[in-house]
Image: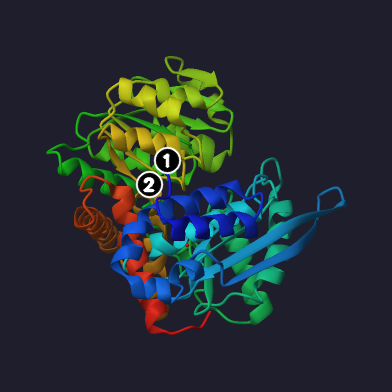
Amino acid sequence: MKLQTEYMQDLMDRVIKNHPSQPEFHQAVQEVLVCMEPVAKAYPEYVKAGIFERMVEPERIIIFRVSWVADNGDVKVNRGFRVQFNSAIGPYKGGLRLHPSVNLGVIKFLGFEQIFKNSLTGLPMGGGKGGSDFDPKGKSDGEIMRFCQSFMTELSKHIGADTDVPAGDIGVGAREIGFMFGQYKRLRNEFTGVLTGKGLNYGGSLVRTEATGYGCCYFTQAMLETKGESFAGKVVVISGSGNVAIYATEKATQLGATVVALSDSGGYIYDPAGVDLKLVKRLKEVERKRISEYVKERPDAKYTSGCSGIWTIPCDIALPCATQNELDGDAANALVANGVVAVAEGANMPCTPQAVEVFLEKGILFGPGKAANAGGVATSGLEMSQNSMRLSWTFEEVDEKLEAIMRNIHRQAKAAAEEYGEPSNYVLGANIAGFLKVANAMYLQGVAY
Ligand code: GLU
């Protein structure tokens, strides 16, 4: 995916120069700019107003020290980040990631993608992302709490229900959101919807836990329907075994498919009879154990260390739900050779540009993360609405809204892809549809940021 015009190539060169050594950010920007070439031609006023230049530069970046005390009394120091990327259509919105691989470039790539994803949901949310290089693995509940409190002590100065509303991402679930919410309330003495993904007893929304995985399946189902297909009777491979993977497994199974594989950062399990989701939930959500433990209780399943082999398992549908760049060109070719019909990104940017090229070239239904995993943040948006109204909707009400939002995202992406001459290219469609709404808002608001 190369840039064709001098204008976009110059812009890309400047991004690389101004944000050195941030390959994930460059990758995310390059993908969007490739899709923006026909848009720049169709909207010369956006070029003149510097919209493309403004879009790739975050409005604000906050970097801070996070000191906390380990159980043995040692003081530890981590780095905290919040990238407030774009507030044209609503308060900054996006998750917090706690993982040793986190650095400024990773948070910038995630914040950049969040702008377009949030726009596609149709809800009034800008784009942001944050996190820390803190590694939650092996930490006690007390250590997690002290880290979260210290992290929030600084973050609280920069967020607010109408300013910036963080949520979970890798390494941040209900436990961490609870500790952070408690600390925010203690510091500010106010009970507001400043975070989403909260517990159900203190302002959380039903379906938020399930939303990213469910949404990914709703989007995939909409893609399959364009070919007269569905999940029924299909074999599905899903990477990851966190929140997204678990609830993608649940929904795919409810829709009649058999999910045969899951993974974590150590390796993957293959269970041809269909994974035992109850067991996975216990191991991962309650006991916080490795996926390798699965085969101890399901002797017919096989565990393989290392992650990339998961894509050599024959399947009809592949849902990468683990992390960025986990599925490369070779893996894409293996999936295609085994007859895959649809691939949808439950994680953020799990497919490398080479993999995406393979899927598009071979005419595989490919749902990019901005569209396919938008269900999580969409339901966060619904949580914000419920908080503002001080009421809670039922599970069925939220689930219905989630499905409608995912189908609407599919419709928008498809329509934009058709309008720009590549009807089956959801990457092009999602980027253009997501971009145009934000660009128009920036244009109408004048030269602010
Ligand atoms: N971290 C999720 C994402 O990548 C959800 C963000 C949110 O709910 O704000 O979209």
Reading the image, the residue beneath label 1 is 246
Q: Of the residues tagged 2 and 1, which is closer to the observer?
A: 2
Q: How far, Cα to Cα, is label 2 from label 1?
A: 7 Å
Q: Which is nearer the eye, 88 or 303?
A: 88
Q: Residues within 10 Å of mark 2 (few under 14, many from 20)?
A: many
Residue 310 falls in image quadrant: top left
The residue sitting at 23% across, 39% down in the picture is 255
Q: Is the C-beta separation of discs 2 and 1 under 8 Å?
A: yes
Image coordinates of residue 33 in percent, x first then y, are 43, 56
Residue 380 horizontal side relative to residue 152, left or right: left
Residue 259: x and y, percent? Answer: 34, 30
Amino acid at circle 1: Ile
Which mark is on residue 213? 2
Q: Is residue 120 left or right of residue 348?
A: left
Give the quadrant of the N terminus: top left
Would you say residue 330 is visible in this rendering? Answer: yes
Along the line of sight, the residue nearer the viewer: 152 or 287: 152
- The quadrant holding residue 435 is bottom left
Q: In the image, what residue type sits under mark 2?
A: Gly
